[in-house]
Image (cartoon, helix red, strand yellow):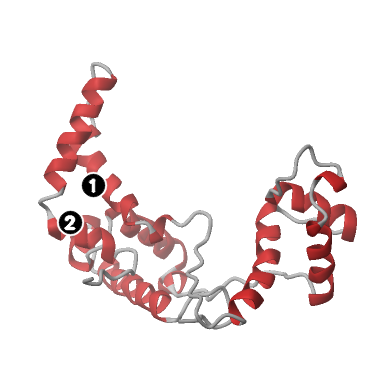
């Protein structure tokens, strides 16, 4: 499956997340508690708290999908020139070894093309070439994710629940005491399939049977 232009995401997950947020907005107007909304929508309490804060500041419109971010890309000609420079290796450009990092590529773009970009911007530029690489290979399926995406990580929801049931408002004697409490909490959670499913649903992802 190949993704359309615009970051590699289909419209399904953003639309699903937006519907959850708008449903939460209706519940906010009814003064429902965050925990109740989280339970009914099967999302994490932290997500509901974040949505409520946005809703309080900007109303339901603040919870509407903003669409994919527009990221600047190097032109095809400049990207081809960048690829040639990268092929020469970092040492040729003054690097200490032959390992390219985003930071080193960012410096190279600044010196070679006189453009200033963040590390995230460099990653976006490299994505242009990667999309061309993927487009030429029908057999290749790629699922790009942003570098930091807690909303896509079910573990974030699980950790939020784990903190409430194991470490909240509690002083531990030492690190071993903390580890024991966390392990006990994880053992309890592994039998709470409704909680685990809720953490997964909160990401907009779906579990498929093998």
Q: Estimate the x, y position of residue 70 in percent, counting from the top left.
A: 64, 72
Asked which quadrant contains residue 88, the reply is bottom right
Above or below residue 3? Residue 188 is: above
Q: Is residue 100 above or below residue 123?
A: above
The residue at which mark 1 appears reads as 161
Pointer 1 and pointer 2: residues touching (CB < 8 Å)? yes
N-terminal label among 1 and 2:
1
Q: In this view, does 93 lie above or below 123?
A: above
The N terminus lies in quadrant: bottom left
Q: Is residue 110 at all visible to an observer of this figure?
A: yes
Q: Where is residue 45 in the image (x, y as percent from the top left)?
A: 27, 54
Picture quarter with the C terminus: bottom left
Quarter residue 162 falls in: top left
Q: Residue furthest top?
A: 173
Q: Give how far across and how far down residue 89 sits, in percent.
A: 79, 51
Residue at point 22%, 41% (across, down): 164
Q: Is residue 74 left or right of residue 49?
A: right
Identify the disc placed on residue 119: none
């Amino acid at each position: 499956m190949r993704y359309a232009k615009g970051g590699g995401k289909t419209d399904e997950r953003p639309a699903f997340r937006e519907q959850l947020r708008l449903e939460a907005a209706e519940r906010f107007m009814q003064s429902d508690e965050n925990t109740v909304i989280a339970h009914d929508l099967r999302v994490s309490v932290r997500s509901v708290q974040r949505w409520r804060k946005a809703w309080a500041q900007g109303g339901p419109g603040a919870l509407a999908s903003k669409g994919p971010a527009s990221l600047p890309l190097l032109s095809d000609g400049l990207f081809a020139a960048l690829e040639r420079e990268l092929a020469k290796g970092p040492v040729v450009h003054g690097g200490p070894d032959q390992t390219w990092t985003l930071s080193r590529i960012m410096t190279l773009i600044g010196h070679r093309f006189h453009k200033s970009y963040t590390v995230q911007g460099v990653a976006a530029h490299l994505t242009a070439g990667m999309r061309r690489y993927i487009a030429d290979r029908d057999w290749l399926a790629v699922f790009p994710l942003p570098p930091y995406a807690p909303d896509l990580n079910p573990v974030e929801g699980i950790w939020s629940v784990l903190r409430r049931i194991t470490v909240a408002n509690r002083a531990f004697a030492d690190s071993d005491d903390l580890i024991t409490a966390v392990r006990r909490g994880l053992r309890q959670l592994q039998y709470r399939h409704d909680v685990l499913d809720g953490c997964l649903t909160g990401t907009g992802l779906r579990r498929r049977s093998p």
